[in-house]
Amino acid sequence: MSAHRPQHGRTPPSADRRRRAGLPRAAAPPLSRRPRPPLRLAGVSEAGRGDWLRGGGGLTWRAGVWAPPGSAANRSEAAAAGRGGRCGAGARAATMPLELELCPGRWVGGQHPCFIIAEIGQNHQGDLDVAKRMIRTAKECGADCAKFQKSELEYKFNRKALARPYTSKHSWGQTYGEHKRHLEFSHDQYKELQSYAQEVGIFFTASGMDEMAVEFLHQLNVPFFKVGSGDTNNFPYLEKTAKKGRPMVISSGMQSMDTMKQVYQIVKPLNPNFCFLQCTSAYPLQPEDVNLRVISEYQKLFPDIPIGYSGHETGIAISVAAVALGAKVLERHITLDKTWKGSDHSASLEPGELAELVRSVRLVERALGSPTKQLLPCEMACNEKLGKSVVAKVKIPEGTILTLDMLTVKVGEPKGYPPEDIFSLVGKKVLVTVEEDDTILEESVENHGKKVKS
């Protein structure tokens, strides 16, 4: 988790080629020891290379080079995206995989398991020990990632918003600013939480609730950025976050489809490693407002990025259904006690529910299986016992040309022609006499397995 992540937008070409060729992916060494392609910058002269590097901009992999944002390589790819018709279709759809490495060694999309985020948010009550207990709980319940919400309050709220009275039963202070400061961890505390998550063995990240929070999380070297619904239509924020080069998980609560299309068009040329989460921002969320069908619509409109779901409903059934519909990232709020002070607790999962959610998701993933329909080995016993065959309805003398009224379908012993072959038997000649109620065997019919010319 804390290992250095190269700031690029795509996996190096060798991994791309292995994936396109259908070869298994080679075991990845720790990121700190992975070889990187030479740092040849597209559209940057050697003289300007040092100046650019000192500026700390993000890099993306473009046409065999690391390309700075705004370079010719990035601009040409952005232009290609604009010619694609649908947001995710056209020239770029052929080159961009429907999967991404969200965390070191952990891929999402394609046939990879759903990535389950345990959203701790601010349900820790401002208590570092509670936060650590929640991280450990997320790990023990089988979640992939423990996530928090990081704000630099003076950059997220204006002074009047922080000074307004806050008398809710969930308040931790007389003003909204006092309330938020009680719940906000310091930079050093975030570093401590990150180290603890690494010790426990779970990925750690946070939503950057403002641009300065994103800067801090970037320095903290989180594996990916989570964009909360409140910033999804904050286009300057999106641009700056995308240019950091880290994968992005973008929620879509409170947004329209037109806005999400704009988000795609802004982020894609800058950083192709991102996904959208269907989300409705209500706590708790009523079933009729979930709109799981948006997942399928996102899959149609944005076919080259993974789609996921962020849920605020009670229970786990709807979230499991989202995975069955193809959600590749699943985020749910968690709590140690739903009765605690805080508006998010009632829409959060307690440890037992989180564990059951993870079990159910993994069960559904196994059940999704293959799109190929065929007789499976596990069905053979039932097929032997109950599978039907074509049977003689009447006695059929040797040399008779079969007609449909001579045949019927029953569970027969021994097995013979399957029922779907009954029409293909019409017009064929029997080579031996078949007694009434006997199975029609392949060796009893002339040219069995071959079509008779009409």
Image: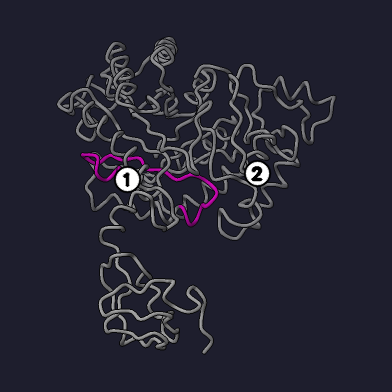
Front in this rendered view, residue 179 or 21: 21
> Which amino acid does the dot numbered 1 rest on?
Thr
Tag of residue 280: 1
Q: Vertical placement of 201 versus 441: above or below?
A: above
Q: Vertical placement of 141 versus 190: above or below?
A: below
Percent x, y for residue 164? 28, 27
Q: Is residue 22 magenta?
A: no
> Which amino acid does the dot numbered 2 rest on?
Ala
Percent x, y for residue 328? 43, 41
Q: Is residue 359 left or right of residue 152?
A: left
Front in this rendered view, residue 45 or 329: 329
Report helix, strand or loop for mark 2: loop
Front in this rendered view, residue 102 or 82: 102
- Which of label 1 and label 2 is nearer to you? 2
Q: Crowdedness of circle 1 by 10 Å Cα count: few (<14), some, many (20+)? A: many
3D distance between C-alphas at marks 1 and 2: 39 Å
Specify start and end residues of the magenta stretch as a single range. 299-320
Tag of residue 454: none
Q: Residue at x 47, y 38 (%)?
A: 112
The colour scheme is one colour
Q: Residue at x 41, y 75 (%)?
A: 444
Residue hosting label 2: 21
Q: Vertical placement of 355 versus 392: above or below?
A: above
